[in-house]
Every structure is written in structure tokens, then in C-alpha cells.
Amino acid sequence: MDSKCKLYDGFLTILHSNVLSAPVWDASVNKYIGFLDIRDLVSFVVFVYDEQMVQDNSRLEDLIVHGVGQFKVKTTDGVTVSYLSRRHKFVTVHESDSLLSVTKLLADAQVHRVPVVDDAGKVINVISQSSIIGLLADKCAEGGTMHDADQALSSFPHLGNAPVLSVLKTESVINTFRLLEKRNLSGIALVDEKGKLVGTTTGKDLGLFLKNPTLAALNRPIFEHLQHIRSELIESKTPCISVEEKDKLSRAVSLLAATRVHRVFVVDNDENYKPIRIISITDIFKFLTQ
């Protein structure tokens, strides 16, 4: 999208395209300057709610108009697509570069997709984390070798993060958003009163909410909210996937590729089903490229 497009139009483009981010082109410097990311709107939601400016009939446009008030920006244009996009790195690779170099870039927690450019600097493709994890899964399925793929996850106790960040499934949507905004995340585990894993949030869920950002939805329990918005989709593919410590690394990779989600939970056992750590695609790429 063009850096001069209105903020509302930029976010609307992302929502209607069912993507989480889009590259931003600045014609004045003749280059891409960053990504406009749907996650930027989480802070808008929290700010507008706390300032009591969101109503049951709120629209996305209202959310953005009021939400920019959180930024104390000393620029001529204020908070724009250009301003927000510069907060998300635009790191490119040349079409002749190796997939290993791409994977190393995607091992950065702040980089989720890498544009591929030709000799003229034109973007000809965008490689996502899911694309690379899909290739790794295919390699495992074909009997190829992948670093330590056949070893149990228990062999790699430092792979991923523990303890798992979670909220009770009865927690409100707005409080869940607050935690996501504070940690700059799109996904968080949902657990019941016994600590059993019952679901997870995703960036897609955020996009679904933003198409109809109402006060009623923000005060609804997060688990109930996710069931509601996902039920409205013809295809709702937002699974919460899990593995156990005894499972192989290759199984975690295959599940991530098959479901196209970005993280897998390691649970203690089938009965308790308590999440003890979480492994993201970023974690796997870091592990493979170190």
C-alpha cells in the first residue's frame, strides 16, 4: 500500500485481504519503508476502551480516529500509515539468496515475513514463516534429514518458552487484549479453572473482532467471544495444537505446517492437558540456525 493512504483505508485493506500485515511503499524515497500490522490496532482498542470512547455501535473508523490520541507524535502529519509502518522492519532478500539466509532472518522475533526483491529492487514474492516450516515438514515426510528432527522434545528443554503465558477462559476480551498489547503478542493460551488448555487466540481473531469493534464484545469472556466470532465463518481453521515431551521435534514441525498456526503448546499429559511450554516457529528457526 502507499505510505500516503489514510490510516483507516490501510487497516481496511488488511482486514478485507484477510492478512495480518502489508508492505508500505514510500514514493518520495522510492522504496518500501516497513509493514502496516493489524496488531497495531490492539493498542488502539485498549486506549479507546479506557478513555470510554467505544460504544456498542462503534465502527473501525471511530476506533482509529480516537485511537491515534494515545500517540504523542511531534510530526507534521501525525500518526499515519508511514509512521506506524516504520515500527515493523522491512528486511529483504535478493531472489538469488539462499533459503538458509531467509530462515535466519525469520528467526528474529520481530520478522514474520521476508520480501524477495529482484535486481531493480521490486518485490516479486514474500516468504512467510509458514512457507519455510512447510518446506521443513515436507523434508521430514520424505524421509529427509533435519537437524535433530527425530529426537524427542524432552531432549531440547530450552526450545520454546516457559512458563506459558495464559488467561482464564472467563477473562474478558479487553483484559486479554491488554496483556497481548503489553507483551506485543497476537497469541495467548486460554485455560480453565484447573489450568487445562482449552484454546488460544490468534492474529486472525483480532482481525475478526476489528470488523465489528463493539463495547459488548470487549466485555464478553474471551473464550465465549472466540466461539462467537469463529462460528460466523464458513471456514474456521484456528486450531489449538499440542504435543507432549515424548513427541519428536518432527511432529511439532508437521503440526505447525498442517494447521498453518505459529505456535504449538507442549502439555504435561492427555489427562491434565496443562501447557508447560510453548514452541513457536521463531523458536524452531532459532534452534535450527544456531
Image: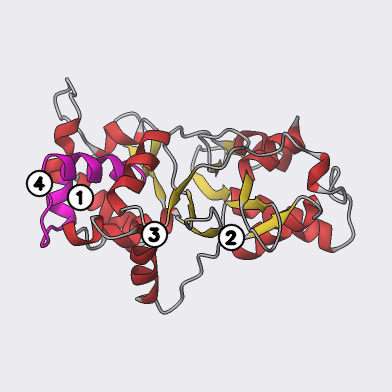
Measure the alpha-carbon separation of dots 3 and 1: 19 Å
Q: Earlier in the sequence, mark 1 or mark 2?
A: 1
Give, as a single range, the part of the protein colored magenta: 38-64
- The amino acid pointed to by label 4 is Met
Q: CA distance from mark 3 to mark 4?
A: 22 Å
* Circle 1 or circle 4, nearest the eye: 4
Q: Which badge, 1 or 4, is on the more N-terminal residue?
A: 1
State the colouring used for the structure image: secondary structure
Q: Which residue is mark 2?
A: 260
Check if mark 1's residue and mark 4's residue have beta carbons within 8 Å.
no
* Mark sitting earlier along the chain (3/1): 1
Q: Is residue 280 visible?
A: no
Residue at the spot x=51%, y=69% of the render? 237
Left or right, residue 93 beside residue 252: left
Disc nearest the viewer among 4 and 2: 4
Q: What's the residue type where badge 2 is placed?
A: Arg
The disc label shown at residue 53, or none: 4
**C-alpha gap between disc 1 and disc 2:** 28 Å
Q: Nearer the viewer, mark 3 or mark 1?
A: 3
* Residue 233: percent from left, percent from top: 38, 75
- Which residue is depicted at the point 85% across and 42% down? 147
Q: Is 101 placed above or below 273 here?
A: above
165 relative to 179 in the view: left or right: right
Q: Position of residue 184 (x, y in %)?
A: 41, 37
Residue placed furthest toward the front: 194
Residue 59, percent from left and from top: 15, 58
Residue identifier under label 3: 205
Q: Residues within 10 Å of mark 1 (few under 14, many from 20)?
A: some
| 3 and 4 marks in contact (CB < 8 Å) | no
